[in-house]
């Protein structure tokens, strides 16, 4: 890329901010325009629960885009013309670029629950329509994916007596923890048999559940929500077994789907996400995709670390660095006292792997390592994440481990 080239970025999330920042470092004169439909400048979406829980103010999670990028907030892109390498905004304005980067992220999934929205609506709203439908949710029902969602939830908390969080993944656990810290009675309903089952094994999920229960959060596993009750405002959550939980506040944390509508309408190749190669290039010349909307080698990562990896590689590639993306070794981190969690890798061991587990019931702490040869391929830490930094470095660098890996699980205090 030379300083005369123009790059348009659709989406103003974490991947977009990182890309713009890295381009500014590599080519300060480059023209990068970021289009975001939220009213806020780019921010760290991973810290939304901490904003809800009043650990951070919204301005404290803002992300830098570098000195030269232009961020256009409250600006929605209506169409991408891949042949002309241009973007048409909802107001009809057309902007031409040398390269276009799709960083449209992922949107919340609205589950197939009766009465989730005001009025009669079809079940299972597609992710592409979720954002426009957010304003049509039954009063008292909230998505939790943006700072606007966070502000709406915070405004509802003072009048709330009992909240139900639907979904026990990362987002649901984070939301429940934040609401409990604000003094709201909280219940989680999760369809799977364990919390955060994509990242934790059964003992780790059990430790997490006990940590939540210590905060006063009730957890219902293996339960599916059938309907919400209430006419003008939600007043209950009906489970598939007929039991009804009282609730005047409901949080939908049922997962996300990549936002691919713009790419699909433009004729780009789309699978679960916008399909990209090792240059983060889509099927259309001059158009790239990064972050939660991008699918590489059949995988959509959905974690901040991967989005930043992709942004770094694309910035280097477009500025002549010749970088290639080979995938990401992503690490999940939730840091909040007894509910702290760190997890990475595929924790289901293969034949021949060594598995090291340490459990401390008195502190409700659980640690697990999966070792293949002399390399760390996965780890789970719940309750005590003091050694997460060293383990993460060993995982990301693929460093050989010491002969006695148990020392890797010892907290720093154990060495004194």
Image (spheres, rainbow, N blue to C red):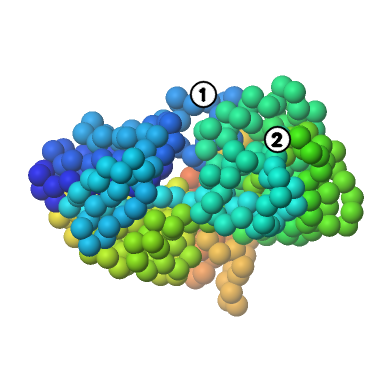
Q: Which mark is residue 288?
A: none
Q: Which residue is mark 1?
A: 57
Instruction: Specify whether 206 is left or right of 293.
Output: right
Q: Which residue is mark 2?
A: 139
Crowdedness of circle 1 by 10 Å Cα count: few (<14), some, many (20+)?
few
Q: Where does residue 392 sit, x and y in percent of width and height? A: 47, 51
Instruction: Specify whether 355 is left or right of 58.
Output: right
Instruction: Specify whether 336 is left or right of 61.
Output: right
Vertical position of residue 203 compared to residue 336: above or below = below
Vertical position of residue 338 compared to residue 106: above or below = above
The answer to whether residue 316 shows anywhere in this view is: no
Q: Looking at the image, how many numbered discs can be counted on the residues?
A: 2
Report helix, strand or loop for mark 1. loop
Q: Where does residue 22 sit, x and y in percent of width and height? A: 26, 43
Location of the C terminus by quadrant is top right
**Eye-nearest disc, 2 or 1:** 2
Report helix, strand or loop for mark 2. loop
């Amino acid at each position: 890329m030379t300083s005369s080239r123009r790059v348009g970025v659709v989406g103003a999330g974490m991947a977009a901010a990182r890309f713009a920042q890295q381009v500014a470092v590599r080519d300060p004169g480059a023209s990068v325009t970021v289009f975001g439909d939220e009213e806020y400048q780019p921010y760290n979406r991973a810290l939304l629960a901490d904003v809800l829980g009043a650990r951070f103010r919204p301005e404290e999670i803002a992300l830098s885009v570098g000195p030269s990028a232009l961020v256009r907030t409250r600006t929605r892109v209506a169409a991408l013309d891949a042949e002309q390498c241009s973007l048409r905004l909802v107001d009809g304005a057309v902007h031409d670029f040398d390269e276009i980067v799709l960083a449209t992220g992922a949107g919340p999934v609205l589950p197939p629950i009766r009465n989730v929205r005001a009025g009669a609506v079809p079940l299972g709203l597609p992710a592409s329509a979720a954002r426009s439908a957010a304003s049509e949710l039954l009063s008292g029902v909230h998505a939790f994916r943006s700072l606007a969602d966070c502000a709406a939830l915070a405004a509802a908390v003072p009048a709330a007596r009992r909240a139900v969080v639907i979904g026990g993944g990362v987002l649901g656990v984070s939301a429940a923890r934040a609401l409990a810290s604000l003094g709201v009675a909280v219940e989680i309903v999760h369809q799977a048999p364990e919390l955060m089952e994509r990242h934790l094994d059964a003992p780790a999920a059990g430790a997490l559940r006990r940590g939540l229960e210590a905060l006063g959060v009730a957890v219902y596993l293996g339960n599916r929500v059938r309907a919400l009750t209430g006419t003008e405002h939600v007043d209950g959550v009906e489970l598939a077994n007929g039991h009804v939980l009282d609730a005047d506040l409901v949080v939908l944390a049922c997962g996300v789907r990549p936002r691919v509508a713009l790419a699909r309408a433009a004729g780009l190749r789309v699978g679960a996400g916008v399909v990209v190669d090792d240059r983060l290039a889509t099927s259309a010349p001059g158009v790239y995709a990064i972050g939660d909307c991008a699918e590489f080698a059949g995988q959509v990562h959905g974690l901040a670390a991967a989005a930043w990896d992709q942004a770094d590689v694309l910035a280097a590639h477009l500025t002549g660095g010749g970088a290639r993306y080979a995938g990401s070794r992503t690490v999940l981190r939730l840091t909040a006292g007894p509910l702290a969690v760190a997890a990475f890798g595929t924790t289901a061991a293969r034949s021949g792997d060594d598995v090291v587990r340490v459990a401390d019931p008195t502190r409700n702490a659980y640690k697990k390592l999966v070792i293949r040869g002399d390399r760390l391929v996965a780890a789970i830490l719940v309750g005590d994440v003091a050694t997460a930094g060293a383990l993460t470095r060993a995982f990301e660098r693929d460093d050989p481990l010491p002969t006695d890996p148990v020392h890797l699980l010892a907290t720093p205090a154990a060495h004194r």
